[in-house]
Amino acid sequence: MEHKLLNLYHDTGIYQLELGQAVMIIVGLLLIFLAIKKGFEPLLLLPIGVGAILVNIPGAGFMAAPVYDATGHMVSPGGLQYYIYHGGIETGLFPLLIFMGVGAMTDFGPMLANPKTLLLGAAAQFGIFATVIGAVLLGASGIMDFTLADAAAIGIIGGADGPTAIFVASRLAPELLGAIAVAAYSYMALVPLIQPPIMRALTSVEERSIKMEQLRPVSKTEKIVFPIVVTLLVAMFLPSAAPLLGMFCFGNLMRECGVVDRLSDTAQNALINIVTIFLGLGVGSKLSAEAFLNIETLGILSLGLIAFSIGTATGVLMAKLMNRMSSSQINPLIGAAGVSAVPMAARVANKVGLEANKQNFLLMHAMGPNVAGVIGSAVAAGVMLSYVGG
């Protein structure tokens, strides 16, 4: 009897729990706290936190691979998170479906009304390439064990686009996926804290007070033609970016064409919500103790913050330059929205603008570079995949 009780105790998670697993369970609880109490990207941080807890429960086998005998018959099925990760994240399916849903929720109107904002979306991607160089130098110096592929995957964090970061990391650095995803979504959630100090440091009160002209109306034809043209151009010149931008533009076309409202509604609501649940659980499955608790994770979190900060700064500086060269005034704050944290970055630009001038409403103007940032980060991802992955 005592022997059976001892065996039962040895099967418990308490007996099998290692220090690293306990730490990662606490990390998962912290993510859940940030999602519920602080409201930091709750749609992703909550399932990621739960996924982190589940994968670190000893003996539960949530990430266990299926086992087959010599004849090919399944002896033991794989765990839930194993199938979620390999079926939806390793294949890139979930990020692409998320992009389709985001496209269906996006209005290209502000960007089409002021095409110059495409330059701001492009400028804000400088943080990606600067951080890639930094990660390569850390790897070359021996401080961090980063390869060129690792550096490319880490750099994408600077675009502040979670699905893009996951898509690139799953192809170039799957072992770093958990840390990269947590960093990307954490910094997206912290946009209201990270961006304002940078924006204020690089602009004067007079610049922040600039009121911009009202945007011109954009026709339905323009909104329908634009996603088709973007898809064709990207497919011809940068095929590696076509999956992301193709799905993004497909979702937007469903929104704007007006003949598939049911499909557009599904992409914007039911489908993206379902995929978000599984994406979070799949990302959480990569937050195992052995994959997350190392010096490289600290390096990823630090480089991600640097990438995001540089992207914000270069966007503001480009907007300052455009303001000096343009016949119509441009508020430099909208340049910070060039990172693709839609629509939070645009809201932050609007909030900082209102602090300087109570009559200064920049939200619609900032949505232009914000949407351009989504396109820019996808193009940057395509460049990375083509150059490094090829």
Image: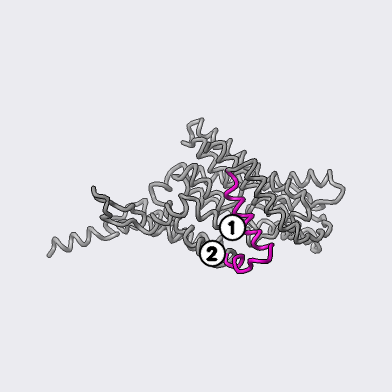
Q: How is the image coloured?
A: one colour
Residue at which label 1 appears? 100
**108 versus 134 height, above or below:** below
345 and 250: which is toward the camera? 250
Identify which residue is drawn at 32% across, 53% down.
66
Q: Quadrant of the N terminus?
A: bottom left
Question: Residue 156 appears at what percent x and percent y?
Answer: 57, 45
**327 versus 348 height, above or below:** above
Residue 242 inside the magenta-drawn segment: yes
Range of magenta residues: 240-266
Q: Which label is found at residue 271?
A: 2
Question: Residue 182 appears at what percent x and percent y?
Answer: 51, 52
Identify which residue is drawn at 82% across, 56% down.
212
Q: Which label is found at residue 217?
A: none
Residue type at mark 2 is Leu
Identify which residue is drawn at 73% across, 58% down.
223
Identify which residue is drawn at 75% across, 57% down.
222
**CB within 8 Å, label 1 to label 2:** yes
141 and 158: which is toward the camera? 158
Identify the element where label 2 is drawn.
Answer: helix
